[in-house]
Each structure stands twice: as structure tokens, then as C-alpha cells.
Amino acid sequence: MIIRDEDVLWRRLHPGWVNDGVLSSIAFVDRRSGKVSVHWSGGIALADVRRHLKPTQLDEVAEIAAGEPRSLECTVEHVPTPDDPSHSQFYPLAPSTSGARRIAKMLALKARLVSLP
Amino acid sequence: MATLTQAPYADLHSVSYAIPVRPGRTQEWLETVLRQSSNWNAEIRPTVSASNSATMLASVLDELQVSALPHLAPSVGGGLQFEYRGLQPHGPRRELDIEILPDGRFGYLMAEAENMDSRDLPRASLPNVVPHLIAWVFRSR
């Protein structure tokens, strides 16, 4: 399915990714696969994201429009899994560690923290 | 205010405030945090290489007598990031992120609002470059 620029993406958060209410850039970095996993709002309601929380994750998520990573030359794609039909991911078209760091910082500035209902 | 879904958890942030802030004690603080990292979620648990590099960075910071403790943020894949925010009273605050990749390599990002510079940081350059980065983030304009 096609994710539109205006569609919202939600990133689940670990406690160390929020410092005094400010989102860390590391929230938008994945040094394992290079692909940042998110929930696509076209496939799940915000309230249902809670079902996917790991025991130590926060009960708030980072929310960002899909157009933001696209504007930073990232691919955004819907990659559903059996457990999570909303699973999506984004990643830089030209991967580099320093480039990913810059993109992550830009996204952290644009994202907002949203409490799960 | 963010809350945890399940207690107890070794919250990095609360750990940093549980230890007195004294100049040149970054290593001591880091050791305490890393000792608790075995309780962290597997996807963010730091690798041995990242932990060793973090200790190396902490020793450089202690030599500089940096009194402010960083915020320590783990990355998916087992890396770590030291984060400092400047205290500039006017205009956007400066921010410095020193990232340690899961394989132990270093990189950094300097940010002043949307003005950013991100580079790899060779291990051998650490003692020469880190003082400039710290001076930049805490310097008044």
C-alpha cells in the first residue's frame, strides 16, 4: 500500500531516547539494519500501538509525517508483518553513518511526542 | 511527562541524576550506568566494543575536567550516544552528540537549530578533537 506524505508515522521509544521532554536524535537511528521501524497510521489506530509496546518502552511515541523523511531523501515503505500489519520503515537512499546522524537529528527536531491513549 | 510501562527499569536518565556531579567523574558515572545495562532491552543493550569505546571517551572527558554529565542514549543495534546541550542564553542552544557505533567507532554531530555538521571521528583523534567539541557546545556566543 502507498504511504502518502501527509500520513503519520509513529516510532515507539526507549526511555533513554527522551531527555527532559526532548527527543534524542538516536530515536531515528537503527545501527543494526539501517532501517527505522515505525507504525503507519494507515494500518493502525494510535490506541492500538500500545499492544506492541515492549515492557521497557515508554507510553508515548514520536509522531512525524511521512513526508519529512522523504524530504530528507529517505525511502518510506510499508512492510507489513504477520504481527503488525502497520509495520513500515524508512531509510536513507544513500546510506552513511554521518548522513544518517544528520537526518536523524532533523527528524528529531520535527517530530513531536504523543502520549498513547 | 513520560512514564514507564513496567517498573522497575534501569532508566538511563534517572541513573545519571543518582550520582553526584563532580568534575572529572564521567568514568565513574558511566561505569554505574553500564553495570545496569544488562537489564536493558536486547535491541539497545550496548555491545562490548561500544562499552569499551564509551569508557575511552569518558577518560578523555575526565582529563578535560568536564563537570557536566552527558545524557547517555542507547541506539538500536548496541551503540551509545553521549549528548550535551549548551547553556547559551540567547538564540538556539548548541547541541553535541558523540555517537559510538556498535563496533566501537566514533562519530559526532554539532547542531545549532537546523545548522549541523556530522562527521566520523577516528579513535586516534579523540584526545585532540573532543576538547574542541566540548568547548564549542559550552561556549557563549
Image (cartoon, coloured by chain):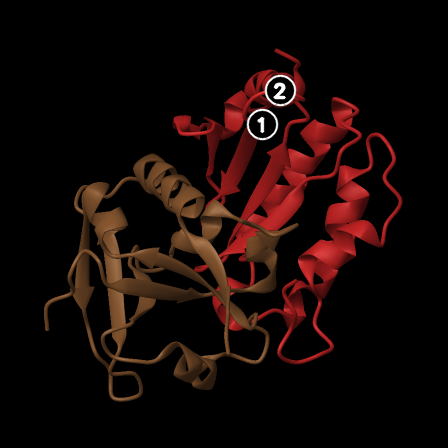
Q: Position of residue B10 (x, y in %)?
A: 71, 67
3D distance between C-alphas at marks 2 and 1: 8 Å
- Parent chain of label 2: B
**Tag nearer the camera, 2 or 1:** 2
- Residue A90 drawn above or below residue A83: above
- Residue A40 drawn above or below residue B128: below
Front residue of B112 and B137 = B112
Residue A117 shown left or right of residue A68 in the figure: right
Q: Position of residue B52 (x, y in %)?
A: 61, 46
Q: Position of residue B86 (x, y in %)?
A: 64, 27
Residue drawn at x 34%, y 40% is: A97
Chain (red): B
Q: Position of residue B95 (x, y in %)?
A: 55, 31
Residue A11 shown left or right of residue B4 in the figure: left
- Parent chain of label 1: B
* Residue, disc 2: B90
The kind of secondary structure element at disc 1 is loop
Residue A37 appears in the picture as rendered: no
Residue B83 shown left or right of residue A65 in the figure: right
Label 2 crowd bin: few (<14), some (14–19), many (20+), radius 10 Å? few
* Residue, disc 1: B93
Q: Amino acid at mark 1?
A: Arg
Chain (brown): A
Quarter of the image with the N terminus of chain A is bottom left
Label 1 crowd bin: few (<14), some (14–19), many (20+), radius 10 Å? some
Q: Amino acid at mark 2?
A: His
